Amino acid sequence: MNESKQVLWTGDELTQLLNTKSSGPVQNIHRVIIDSREAEEGDLFVALSGDPGPRFNPSRISDRNGHDYVEDAKNRGATACIVEQAVKSKLATYRVADTYDALWTIARKARTKLSGPVAAVTGSSGKTTFKNFFVQGSGGYGSPASFNNHIGVPLSLANAPHHSRGPFIFEIGTNHAGEISPLREIVDPDLAVLLNVHQAHIGNFDSLEQLRNEKLSISNPDKTEALFVCDEKLKPYAPQGSYFFGNSSESHSRILSVSDGTMHLNLLGEKLTANIPGGGQHRALTMSAVLLAQKLLGLDISGSLELTEEAIPEGRGNETKISGITIVDDSYNANPESMSAALTFMAQDESPGRKIAVLGEMLELGNITASEHKKMAKVFSAFDKVFLVGEGFKETDSSGWFPEANTDLIAEVEAYAKPGDKILIKGSNRIFWAKNFVEKLVESMK
């Protein structure tokens, strides 16, 4: 165990918090985990079932049960575990009625330990990019990866370094009505940000209005001192006293111009110039929101003005060069607005070489699925070749359609591409990202 790790939880603290005694002595806890494969000395393993029940709406139900992996966690060095059913293990064990409730209980307690400013961000797209820009620009702690659901948010809180002065930034996501409010309540942010409301997951909502109201619920009407930042397009729906970012004179963080990976903006009356890692109007909007949030929290924004490409999270537009070919990995997720923005940005790229798009279908769009996929074809003429993947794109005109992102697709892309080309890869999470498609394509092209 790394002795430099800070103690997050003590055995006595957990006993009191969970109202149950451990089956054995518990040393200090340095990290809370739910994946036994990550276990090491100082870890508390929380055994969660793959089906959380009617309280939550996971995008997928797993048939795996964390209780089956308690011994694996022990063998890898875990210090203790939390279970809700009997397990055969010599690992120090806290037995509770519900391990999800236990995780949320730990998260609520963790929030009370945070003394620095706490921010939360939601939106149909850009949450992880916002978080990365925020953390790399001002330091502090950000939730790992895209931990933004009923497991990721409490886990992020449970592991927040309360010895630090922050700032702390947490992502909050949703794909069903009623998810954001409980997550916002345990994060209890001093400042909340709503980046945008697109038609992502619209198939799980009755209307765009219901989706918008769900996103707006990240603001806290009961915490009068809490700040709220959102896109100027949402001004008619935002609570009184909100702050806005955008392109108009009504925005508190107003983008004046964008060019060559740089933007000029007016931030609360001060004119500034900032780098835009990855470039593009969509990332400029994200950066303008970051700077406004940091300024309102009284943080130093100088680091955020000078961010580099390294601030871009994986799968959100990172560029990899292989065999003279540039691959733009935007494969983490997609909705109509984010896909349109990525295609438009690529189409406007004036660098030499052919442009290729590998597009995966956009999921959870409900009855607008067909129309939204066909709309993407309006930009196809700017590309030398377009490969389409999934049922959503089956009826869209293209010279190359594949039912899934498989080895056949990799072979076709590899056969077509040549040095000097640039390839954009974008689609819903389950199409490319969950299958490590970009990684496999790069490996095949070496």
Image: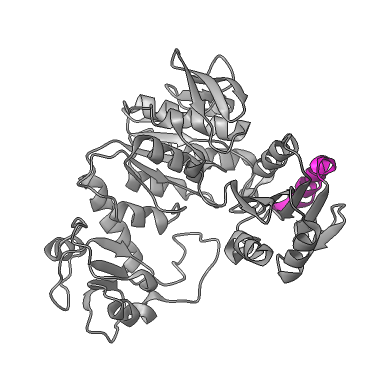
Q: Is residue 362 left or right of residue 216?
A: right
The C terminus lies in which quarter of the figure? bottom right
Q: Is residue 404 left or right of residue 32?
A: right
Q: Nearer the viewer, residue 256 or 92?
A: 256
Q: Nearer the viewer, residue 232 or 51?
A: 232
Residue 183 seen anywhere in this rendered image of the structure: yes
Q: Nearer the viewer, residue 310 or 221?
A: 310
Residue 230 seen anywhere in this rendered image of the structure: no
Residue 249 percent location from the top left of the image: 56, 14
Instruction: Reply above or below: 298 against 209.
Output: above
Q: Nearer the viewer, residue 441 or 433?
A: 441
Total tally of numbered discs in the picture: 0
Residue drawn at the location 29% of the way across and 50% of the way down:
160
Residue 444 lies within the magenta run: no
Residue 306 percent location from the top left of the image: 45, 30
**Which picture quadrant has residue 401?**
bottom right
| Model colouring | one colour
Residue drawn at the location 36% of the way across and 67% of the way down:
34
Residue 220 percent location from the top left of the image: 38, 35
Residue 88 percent location from the top left of the image: 28, 87
Instruction: Reply above or below: 199 against 303.
Output: below
Q: Which residues are magenta?
A: 365-383
Residue drawn at the location 27% of the way across and 57% of the way down:
105
Query: Extreme bottom residue here?
Result: 88
Residue drawn at the location 28% of the way across and 40% of the way down:
166
Name the dominant secondary structure of the magenta segment. Answer: helix
The N terminus lies in which quarter of the figure? bottom left
